[in-house]
Image (cartoon, rainbow, N blue to C red):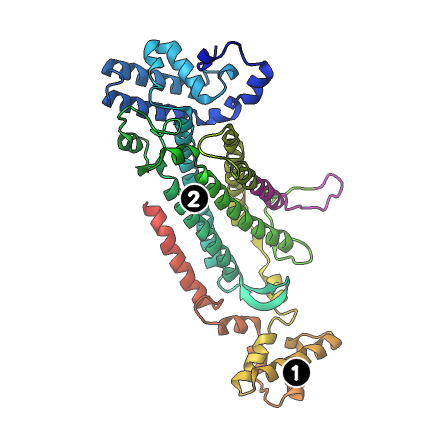
Amino acid sequence: MKLWSGRFTKNTKKEMDDFHSSISFDMRLYRQDIMGSIAHSKALLKCGVITEEEFSRIKEGLEGILEDIENGAIQFDTGYEDIHMNIEKLLTDRIGEAGKKLHTARSRNDQVAVDFKMYLKEQVKEVEQQLIGLLETLADLSEQNLDTIIPGYTHLQHAQPVTLAHHLMAYFEMFKRDVTRLEDCYRRMDESPLGSCALAGTTYPLDRELTAKLLGFAAFTQNSLDGVSDRDYAIEFLAACSIIMMHLSRFCEELILWSSSEFGFVEMDDAYSTGSSIMPQKKNPDAAELIRGKTGRVYGNLMGLLTVMKGLPLAYNKDMQEDKEGVFDTVDTVKGCLSVFVPMLATLKFNKGRMYQAAGEGFSNATDVADYLVKKGVPFRTAHRIVGELVLGCCEKGLSLGQLTIEDYRRVSPVFQEDILEVIKPENCVAARNIPGGPAPEQVKAHIQKSRDFLSHFSKS
């Protein structure tokens, strides 16, 4: 018999039970549901709905259920449709009439909302800590590669030389923003909906401040309709995770390219690579490819929940049961990807010689030649045309700018002097960009120090 069956004259069909049930996935919320129930029973005690003795029995009963669940001694019953009904039934079976009082002044609507928020608050902090680990790895690798020259790209074409440290610290900034997005998301979800009941609050004088504090919330929601019908916090979490995955995917795309024979910049550690069933020579960057691929499912979960919520009137609607599976899948996917990506990144082998060689190819020092002329008094547009002619000549002869002689330079402009041959060396091109935010080693070193300061905030908190 369903706990809500009093108004009904016959049982639901088995097909309906299976279709309606959420216990197969919302059982993940068992601990939050039990903690929420203990806090609610404390509020019921304070406003005189239950006695001290009943409160003690409810609390002990719930704690016993929690222990049994975590020891694997409880199997949930699909006949009781969700985690809330399962735990209430278990409690009533164990302590009798006192268990039937627990749901006073509460609905599954505010019950699931508080469970889900508590769960997501925990997951935000766990993902944040994984990101902090990634940021620490990026800072360490950058510190080790302040002088490692690589080509910088636009349109995937050689653009200007930079350093590997500068390149890695670009990703540091991306993932740092991801951390701050999660912190913002956490602040907005840090309000307890418990006490909103079904949609209109309750006639009992519940101390909502008490229950919010007991459950670790900074405050309680200010509108009971919003308290039960809001899923902004889940959507915002999914959006933040989608951006995290986008950043991971971009990074993985570069590592996949860099590990190819055509680039030859990095080699993946054997622990994060796989082979081919037919081609014995293959070493495939499967971990990076999987992360890139899993980005799509996280995007899909965000779009799924946005679509579920877009046409719902206030307050709770059963459609909102569809909020959890996509969120749970996103949590597992993002945490799983980060758990592989961070050690994969830390164990990369960089081919510094090949990177330096590539930085001298593709005319990535052409802008520096133009800047040289400008500093000698040549208007930039004129300098741009002169260097374009130099590059065209090099293309026709199969040469690079570094292979030209001073006579070759002076043939296109008498402004060139012997020092141009030093100016165009990749390491000098990088060092010359000594502006805050630029790739010069001293600037990147300063950036890393600021980044360490940012990370120290998390080690203390």
Mark whose residue sits in front, 1 or 2: 2
Amino acid type at mark 1: Thr
User: In the image, what residue type sits under mark 2?
Assistant: Glu
- As for residue 303 lying within the magenta part, the answer is no
Residue 141 image point, x, y percent: 49, 55
In the image, taking residue 439 as reference, residue 253 lies left or right, namely right
Residue drawn at point x = 30 percent, y = 29 percent: 211
Residue 326 at least partly seen: yes
First-in-chain label (1 vs 2):
2
The verdict on residue 286 being magenta is yes
Which is nearer the eye, 245 or 214? Answer: 214
Front-most of residues 9 and 301: 9
Which quadrant holds residue 448? Answer: bottom left
**Residue topped by disc 2:** 128
Determine which residue is flagged by label 1: 405
Please give the range of residues in magenta: 276-300
Query: Which residue is pictured at 45% across the width and 58% down the height?
Result: 143
Majority SS type along the magenta span:
helix
Q: Position of residue 210 (x, y in %)?
A: 26, 30
Q: Is residue 319 left or right of residue 54?
A: right
The answer for how far apart the CA atoms under marks 1 and 2 are is 54 Å
**Position of residue 344 measured from the top left corner of the image (x, y, whole percent):** 55, 46
Relative to the observer, which residue lies in front, 94 or 282?
A: 94
Badge 1 crowding class, 10 Å Cα cut-off, few under 14, some 14 to 19, many 20 or more, is few
Disc 1 is placed on an element classified as loop
In this rendering, is residue 67 above or below 155? above
**CA neighbours of label 2 inside 10 A, class few (<14), some (14 to 19), many (20+):** many
Q: Position of residue 399 (x, y in %)?
A: 70, 75
Q: Is residue 422 something that shows in the picture? A: no
